[in-house]
Image (cartoon, rainbow, N blue to C red):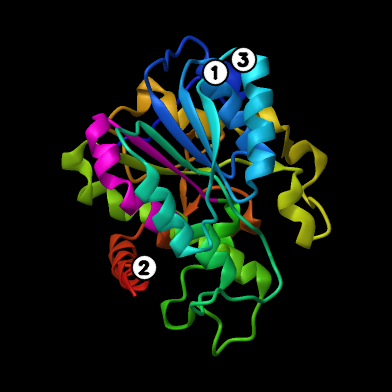
């Protein structure tokens, strides 16, 4: 397969990437749409005419954000809905409340390098939030995505996936000493593997799933790491950070493309060492056997 390339790059903004794209009549969900790059992602989709639902843990903040987007874009079809992706019951409730087709799902919500914590079901919190809850959400919305015809799912990963593969024998750090960055890396590798696993499974339904690395953006995501450590020349604005999500969700270049990893609005090169956690996608994150193993594991966890 030839890698997908575009005229956009590191400095492109979400608005630039979406210019000329018409989304009127398209319905979109963005998890974590009331903070960080989620706000910009939602705003650009709304500006292009999409019907946008902000799926958020803090409903009050989500409603304020929705009102601000409506005021800025003039698009009245923007709203907030309650969703805590770390809580599988909250995910089930959200899915049960959704009716009709879904054209775009952006799994944007996430946490990073948090202190050791597990959900009530014993799942390590970063794995539960960054991957498992989004897996359950996307699987739960499968029929709505299929109904849309040509639906796109965007799974937000990170260059942090280069820190760690999914350690299947100890996902919850019951044997290893807990390391917040290893846990973060594992969860972001899982997000890429989900895209790989969905590509073949959902192709006949017309659903594409791709992973993205948004870039290094100073947001609340880094509150447990003491702030963004990336040198200034490697940082992006929020507007630039939302661009790759918008590109993968809307670009005509990606029609029918699934199971791939994008950064800076282009498909990333596969790498075989951590290269300082800077760029590219790890071979282990694209491995189909890893993807199948993770899919089976995640399916058991959400069923339990």
214 or 51: nearer the eye? 51
In the figure, is residue 196 to the left or right of 77? left
Crowd band around label 2 with a 10 angstrom C-alpha radius: few (<14), some (14–19), many (20+)? some
Q: Residue at x 42, y 77 (%)?
A: 168
The residue where tag 2 is placed is: 302
Q: Residue at x 54, y 61 (%)?
A: 129
Question: Which of the image's four quarters has the N terminus?
Answer: top left
Looking at the rendered structure, which numbered label has been put on residue 49? Answer: none
Farthest residue to the bottom: give it.
Answer: 175
Cα gap from disc 3 to disc 1, whole angstroms: 8 Å
Q: Which residues are magenta?
A: 134-157
Could you tell me which secondary element the residue under label 3 belongs to? helix
* Residue 12 place in picture, x, y as percent: 62, 23
Q: Earlier in the sequence, mark 2 or mark 1?
A: 1
Q: Does residue 141 belong to the magenta stretch?
A: yes
Q: Which residue is mark 3?
A: 73
Q: Could you say where residue 60 lies in the image, as x and y percent from the top left? A: 68, 42
Q: Nearer the viewer, mark 2 or mark 1?
A: 1
Name above or below for residue 199 compared with residue 174: above
- Nearest to the observer: residue 77 or residue 222: 77
Q: What is the spatial separation of the Cα atoms under label 3 and label 2, in whole angstroms?
A: 38 Å
Can residue 10 be seen here? The reply is no
Q: Residues within 10 Å of mark 1 (few under 14, many from 20)?
A: some
Q: Nearer the viewer, mark 3 or mark 1?
A: 1
Q: Which residue is mark 1?
A: 76
């Amino acid at each position: 397969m030839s890698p997908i390339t575009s005229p956009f790059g590191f400095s492109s903004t979400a608005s630039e990437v979406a210019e000329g794209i018409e989304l009127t009549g398209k319905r979109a969900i963005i998890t974590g749409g009331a903070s960080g790059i989620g706000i910009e992602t939602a705003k650009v989709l709304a500006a292009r005419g999409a019907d946008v639902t902000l799926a958020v843990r803090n409903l009050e903040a989500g409603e304020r954000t929705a009102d601000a987007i409506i005021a800025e874009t003039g698009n009245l079809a923007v709203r907030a809905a309650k969703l805590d992706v770390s809580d599988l019951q909250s995910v089930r409730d959200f899915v049960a409340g959704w009716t009709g087709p879904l054209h775009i799902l952006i799994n944007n919500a996430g946490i990073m390098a948090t202190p050791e914590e597990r959900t009530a079901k014993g799942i390590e919190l970063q794995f539960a939030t960054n991957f498992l809850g989004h897996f359950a959400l996307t699987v739960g919305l499968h029929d709505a995505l299929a109904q849309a015809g040509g639906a796109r799912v965007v799974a937000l990963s990170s260059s942090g996936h280069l820190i760690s593969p999914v350690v299947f024998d100890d996902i919850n750090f019951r044997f290893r000493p807990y390391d917040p960055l290893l846990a973060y890396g594992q969860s972001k590798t899982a997000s890429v593997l989900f895209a790989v696993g969905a590509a073949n499974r959902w192709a006949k339904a017309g659903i594409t799933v791709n992973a993205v690395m948004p870039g290094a953006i100073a947001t609340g995501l880094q509150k447990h790491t003491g702030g963004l450590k990336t040198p200034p020349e490697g940082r992006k604005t929020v507007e630039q950070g939302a661009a790759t999500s918008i590109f993968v969700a809307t670009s005509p270049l990606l029609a029918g493309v699934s199971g791939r990893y994008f950064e800076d609005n282009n498909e990333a090169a596969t790498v075989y060492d951590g290269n300082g956690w800077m760029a590219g996608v790890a071979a282990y994150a694209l491995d189909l056997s890893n993807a199948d193993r993770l899919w089976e594991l995640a399916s058991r966890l959400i069923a339990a």
